[in-house]
Image: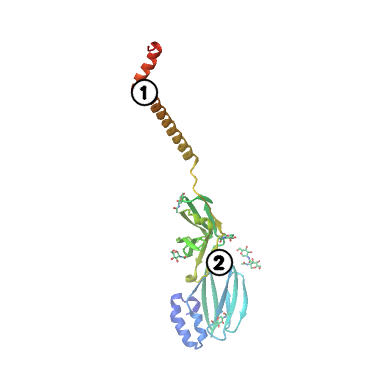
Amino acid sequence: MPLAMAPFGGWGALAAFLSLLCCRGSGEKAFEGPKQLMVGSGEFQFINCTASCTDPKRLVLETALNKTLLESQTQWKLFKVYNISKDEELLCSSTCGGKQETKVFHITVFYPPKQVLLTLSPTSVAVGTLFTIECRVPAVAPLEGLTVTLLRGTEILYNQTIVGTALSPQDAVVTHNTTAHREDGLYNFSCEAQMDLRSRGGGFVHRVSDPQRLEVKEPVPNNQTVIIAIVIVLLLLFVTFILLCFVFSQKWFRGRTGHYGVYATWRRLIGSHRAPPL
Ligand SMILES: *[C@@H]1O[C@H](CO)[C@@H](O)[C@H](O)[C@H]1NC(C)=O
Ligand SMILES: *[C@@H]1O[C@H](CO)[C@@H](O)[C@H](O)[C@H]1NC(C)=O
Ligand SMILES: *[C@@H]1O[C@H](CO)[C@@H](O)[C@H](O)[C@H]1NC(C)=O
Ligand SMILES: *[C@@H]1O[C@H](CO)[C@@H](O)[C@H](O)[C@H]1NC(C)=O
Ligand SMILES: *[C@@H]1O[C@H](CO)[C@@H](O)[C@H](O)[C@H]1NC(C)=O
Ligand SMILES: *[C@@H]1O[C@H](CO)[C@@H](O)[C@H](O)[C@H]1NC(C)=O
């Protein structure tokens, strides 16, 4: 059976067989299954092509991508593959003892956070009022590897691990509404994006936004409240004034006439004009 045609399921038995043939310890690594790698879009990847025997006939890396040979020994060759912009399969092949060996590298392109944009809105708030912290990480993939953390100084205000299955790059947006405290004005707000692809053969990318300040103001009553308060006070003063006038006028007439009541007083006043007392 030609080796190149063996399905991947057959690798295990084949690997066991060949590693028995090849007693050199260094040969064993050539028979791991297909290797998963993650590469940032447009970046490069080192590929070490290894043969199971010490004198391979032909040791090559098959790819349409640009590559350079960095280092070469009888049993392995180290390549640098450039400018990887889409998912690729790279194939290392060699011929040992007349048999062809292949090893597949599955390369998945990821889009690391290149920018982290933090927006506070509004940028100037009164103590006790709500403001929104928004953090945008443009064009990232895969989303499920991304954690976005909102910070005040070094304190974590909020963090979120993004979920999503889209393979094409897209914006990750995290918003958090919170109430302004007096001390918020003393710190820088920032946003941190972490893409952790270590469990999938990729790396760990960490990027932080520019710091943002929040202007915190003491609460100021608004104009309407002030106007209403002034009107109410004026009305109260007016009513009090009227009442006082009334009470004093009653006392004054009572003192002059010895009678009670407005009507009586009025009658007396009118009457006194018509027919002055003796
Ligand atoms: C390539 O792999 C072989 C076998 O695993 C190893 O001996 C060699 O040091 C590796 N080369 C580099 C540059 O890592
Ligand atoms: C390889 O690199 C050359 C120049 O460095 C460039 O002209 C060519 O387009 C590249 N090929 C690929 C497949 O990227
Ligand atoms: C990388 O790839 C892009 C498009 O795939 C191409 O425009 C660019 O010239 C390439 N760069 C190099 C250095 O090969
Ligand atoms: C997210 O916040 C929780 C609780 O504040 C913390 O335990 C966890 O470590 C944070 N995760 C990251 C990735 O910072
Ligand atoms: C935050 O508040 C804005 C309006 O002020 C609202 O549209 C948005 O849904 C809120 N976001 C969260 C996460 O509660
Ligand atoms: C906030 O950030 C600015 C600009 O980077 C810096 O100059 C300032 O020292 C920072 N303030 C605090 C309290 O960390």
Q: Nearer the viewer, residue 36 or 267?
A: 267
Report the residue that reaches farthest toward the front. Answer: 278
Q: Secondary structure at mark 2?
A: strand
The disc placed on residue 5 is none
Q: Residues within 10 Å of mark 1 (few under 14, many from 20)?
A: some
**Which quarter shows the C terminus?**
top left
Vertical arrangement, residue 121 with respect to residue 152, above or below: above
Q: Is mark 2 within 8 Å of ligand 3?
A: no
Point out the frontmost of discs 2 and 1: 1
Instruction: Measuring from the top left, give residue 245's x and y in whole percent.
Output: 42, 27
Q: Tell me what residue is drawn at x 52 percent, y 85 percent.
A: 26
Q: Secondary structure at mark 1?
A: helix
Please state which amino acid type lies under the numbered disc 1: Arg
Residue 87 shows in this picture: no
Q: Mark 2–mark 1 contact, CB under 8 Å?
A: no
Q: Nearer the viewer, residue 85 or 158?
A: 158
Instruction: Measuring from the top left, give residue 134's x and y in whole percent.
Output: 50, 55
Instruction: Measuring from the top left, give residue 277's x and y in whole percent.
Output: 37, 12
Q: Earlier in the sequence, mark 2 or mark 1?
A: 2
Quickly name the residue at label 2.
40
Quickly name the residue at label 1.
254
